[in-house]
Image (cartoon, rainbow, N blue to C red):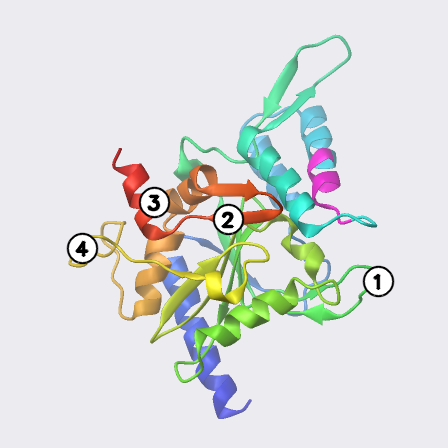
Amino acid sequence: MSNVGQLERKTQNRAVTFLKEQLNYDYLGDWEYREGNSNIETALLTRWLKARRTPETLIKRALRKLDAAAALGEGKKLFDANKDVYRLLRYGIKEKEGTGQQNQTVWLIDWENPEANHFAIAEEVTVKGDQLSPKRKRPDIVIYVNGIALGVIELKRSSVSVSEGIRQNLDNQKKDFIRNFFSTMQLIMAGNDTQGIRYGTIETSEKYYLEWKEPNRTQGLPAAGVTADTLLDTHLAQLCDKHRFLQLIHDFIVFDAGVKKTCRHNQFFWYSSR
């Protein structure tokens, strides 16, 4: 491995350790050589739903609906697939356990109790493109909530601009690469130790990626007991804190005339203080 690669690997190792030890994410492993990596890890989602006593029939039907929503079939745009998935995440999946029975709501995320969800990360997640594009790409860190990929982080060494990570995220969303993997994504991030993190969502152009800023600079971190050594750590704590991560997705995502948007930090704090 080159010295450049070692520097980026060091940054990634630190970020993974921070997410595990400071923010209490489970570690799924290095998935570079794991087969079948997906944005919907069915086994993890099924296990979480079973733990909540969801009937097996409803689990199977909910999974079929989620898979159908996330699939990028011929002519389906990433925006439309992502919007379909978001609706299921936000409002749950209405299904009947049997003929003649009433609809029940299968919740894929427990929005009211963030700690009741399974937050996990995997690194070096090798993903194959769709049938028309078998090229492989490998996002640095993927955030899974109940087995559903909701966040991705590309990391660079300090001497390389965060812009390079942003452009890498944008390339990954192209039809020629792993566009299909982004149909469930909500927050897309790129960062390094010196600039911290810039964030957006699917198909956000580079100039609209945002930097998070806390109104109380002396406090800086939303979670008690979290220690941040770099700006990257601080931004990870501010954006990936379990409660805030879900709040950003639940309350601050808009699909507007073919463009998916999320909030600036000042909009978040203005709305939250109301």
Q: Position of residue 74 (x, y in %)?
A: 83, 50
Disc 2 residue type (three-letter): Lys
In the image, is residue 66 part of the stretch drawn in magenta?
Answer: yes
The mark that comes first in sequence, 4 or 3, is 4
Going by the image, does 198 lie left or right of 184? left
User: Which residue matches tag 1?
Assistant: 132
User: Which residue matches tag 4?
Assistant: 219
Q: Where is residue 81 in the image (x, y as percent from the top left)?
A: 69, 45
Look at the magenta stretch and give its main secondary structure: helix
Mark-to-mark CA distance, 4 and 3: 17 Å
Disc 1 residue type (three-letter): Leu
| Image quadrant occupied by the C terminus | top left
User: Which residue matches tag 3?
Assistant: 268
Part of the protein shown in magenta: 65-72
Going by the image, does 109 lie left or right of 130? left
In the image, is residue 156 part of the stretch drawn in magenta?
Answer: no
User: Which residue matches tag 2?
Assistant: 261
Residue that lies at the very extreme toward the bottom in this rendered image: 2
Disc 4 residue type (three-letter): Gln
The mark that comes first in sequence, 1 or 2, is 1
The mark that comes first in sequence, 1 or 4, is 1
Of residue 230 and residue 272, the one placed in the foreground of this image is 272
Disc 3 residue type (three-letter): Phe
**Residue visible at 28% across and 41% down?**
270
Label 4 residue SS: loop
